[in-house]
Amino acid sequence: MNIQFNTLLNRPTGLMVCFTLLLTACGGGGDDSGAATPAPVATTPAPATTTPDPDPAPTPTSLDDLIVDADNKLQSAYTLTVDIDKGNSNRGYFSLCDDYQANGGGYKVNFNSCLFRGPLTKGKLSKDIKVANHESQLIAVIWFYDGQAPQFVEWSYLQGEDSQVLTMN
């Protein structure tokens, strides 16, 4: 009998059967001493009448799924009309920039960020400028050649307006 048992252990199938019997005999349960009975859950009755929710809009997964309002013009820029009339024949130079900071009573302007630059002709300038939609705060600066102090005007995009106008008189 001893020979048969050693032969059984030398075979892979026999080893697997022995280990399976050992694992089955050991069980697999845990310690029941700390187990607590679950507390009863209070339930509330459901309301008698419910209105069905409308079908939620599906989350867009591609451009074909997007829904665009009929009023949206799908334009990435707007037109800003610049109208300057200083009422004199002084020569000047106009700059419209988007990178600036207010410093007390003046401004610090990054003139490398200007969207438009151009001369005043006899104190006047009239120009339509395309401005990107994300540009909602701009500063206009007029420099005069005769040595006068520059004039600064802050301009902000007006929501709901059909036309955007910057006027300096």
Image: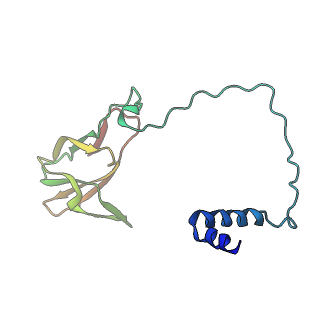
In the rendered image, the vertical position of residue 155 relative to residue 159, given as above or below: below
List x then y, in percent, for residue 128: 20, 39
Task: Name the one closer to the observer, 78 or 104.
Answer: 78
Q: In this orientation, which residue lies closer to the viewer: 10 or 68?
A: 10
| Quadrant placement of the N terminus | bottom right
Where is residue 169? Give x, y as percent.
26, 46
Question: Looking at the image, which residue is at 57% across and 28% down?
Answer: 55
Q: Viewed as shown, does residue 46 lie left or right of 16?
A: right
The answer to whether any part of residue 38 appears in the image is: yes
- Residue 105 image position (x, y, % from top left): 36, 65
Residue 27 in view here: no
The answer to which of 4 and 8 lies nearer the viewer is 4
> Which quadrant holds residue 9?
bottom right
What's the coloring here?
Answer: rainbow
Q: Is residue 119 left or right of residue 114?
A: left
In the image, what residue occupies the spot 33% across and 31% down? Answer: 73
Q: Residue at x 32, y 44 (%)?
A: 133
Residue 78 falls left or right of residue 59: left
Camera-side residue of 141 and 156: 156
User: Is 87 drawn above or below residue 25 in the view shown?
Assistant: above
Can you give x and y, in whole percent of width and height, for residue 139 in the image? Answer: 29, 54
Number of numbered discs visible in the structure rendering: 0
Side of 160 where 33 appears, left or right: right
* Figure quadrant of residue 160: top left
